[in-house]
Image (cartoon, rainbow, N blue to C red):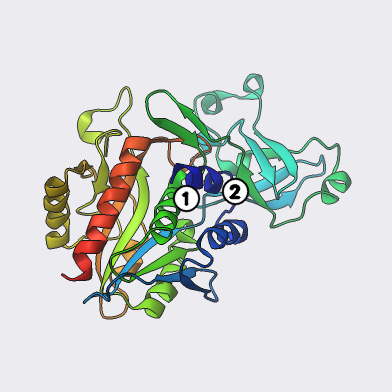
Amino acid sequence: MLEALRDLCLINGISGDENKVRDYIISRIEGKCQYKIDPMGNILAFKKGKETPKNKVMLSAHMDEVGFIVTYICDNGCLKFTNVGGVDPKVAVGRAVKVGENVSGVIGSKVLHLTKGDEEKTVPALDKLYIDIGVDNKEEAEKLVSLGDPVYFVSDFVTFGKDKIKAKAIDDRFGCAIMIKLIESDLPYDCNFAFLVQEEVGCRGTAPAVYSIRPDYAIVLEATTASDISGVSEENSVCVQGKGAVVSFMDRSTIYNRDLFKGAFSLAKDKGIAVQTKTTVAGGNDAGAIHKACEGVYTIAVSLPCRYIHSGTSVGDIKDMTACFDLAKALYEEYANA
């Protein structure tokens, strides 16, 4: 699973530009399951298990990552841009980026000695930043880039410290890696998998996938904010790395079924899987669209605690990844004949 995660995180694929991520996933699942690509670009896969279950279970994860898109080329050759998905300007300033696949750049801002008043104390908004691609004028820039070109964080996949990894796009290539591992495994029951597009810009790929599969139960595999860092109180940490998979009771798009929420903790206890819940009602994911689709779908989210999420230097814990995999597999087996 770690190998698949490394490969996936090193692929570029902002919302609406998931082609290369999709190609990699298909290369891993080809011949191991049935699959189709719907008009939105979702991969909808079906893995035959040893038995046909009572209930149709769907696992989902999104393929897209946050990033930027070129909106204007300045006379001096610098590029103006806007965000694709939720990106805090603080994590953008000074970062190395790729425009398209081949053009290197750096996100720059006004130098400190030219700032005045409140500018000295605040992070500039994205519309005050620019991408320097190393050319002298607009004409040179236009030979290399076009309006609408995607812009990605540049980030290596690094293991460090005690069981930690650093990479871009852990949200949600981690969920995709779990589903690849399950598809590559022998499963006890038939299972459906949805590799979804455009989650970061409003869960736009979700509804078409759900209406196509029409599951009874859905398990959403995600990454969620871990603020367990210096200067943040325990009650505001959201979740803690090293304490296992995160199962939420509520976020900004879903109030999760109470029986499923409590049942996940009971199942995790029985199987010795580390699990925790979020201490803050925040964020949202594809569950928000899944649970209210069709006639309604029993939905739960299993999330990886991720520090510095939606940046080029997100950090995850390998122990938590194992816990998320184990819990997702246990829940799928539980729901198959619930």
Residue positioned most to the top: 113
What is the number of the mark on residue 309?
Answer: none
Residue found at x 60% / y 61%: 23
Where residue 212 sits in the image (x, y, percent)? 41, 79
Q: Is residue 104 left or right of residue 263?
A: right
Give the crowd class for mark 2: few <14, some 14-19, many >=20 residues within 10 Å: some
**Residue 154 sits above or below residue 114 on the image:** below
- Judge whether residue 282 can be spotted in this image: no
Q: Is residue 299 left or right of residue 110?
A: left
The quadrant the C terminus occupies is bottom left
Residue found at x 52% / y 42%: 6
Q: Quadrant of residue 116?
A: top right
Task: Give me the C-alpha separation between circle 1 and circle 2.
Answer: 10 Å
Q: Which callout, 1 or 2, points at the residue further toward the start of the chain?
A: 2
Labelled pair 1, 2 in contact (Cβ < 8 Å):
yes
Instruction: Compare residues 189 and 164 and report the one nearer the observer.
Output: 189
Where residue 296 sits in the image (x, y, percent)? 25, 75
Amino acid type at circle 1 is: Arg
Q: Secondary structure at mark 1?
A: helix
**Can you identify the residue that label 2 sits on?**
11
Residue found at x 46% / y 69%: 33
- Judge whether residue 1 can be spotted in this image: yes
Where residue 191 sits in the image (x, y, percent)? 34, 69
Where residue 227 sits in the image (x, y, percent)? 32, 34
**Can you identify the residue that label 1 sits on?**
173
Q: Is residue 294 left or right of residue 250?
A: right
Instruction: Compare residues 329 and 222 and report the one nearer the observer.
Output: 329
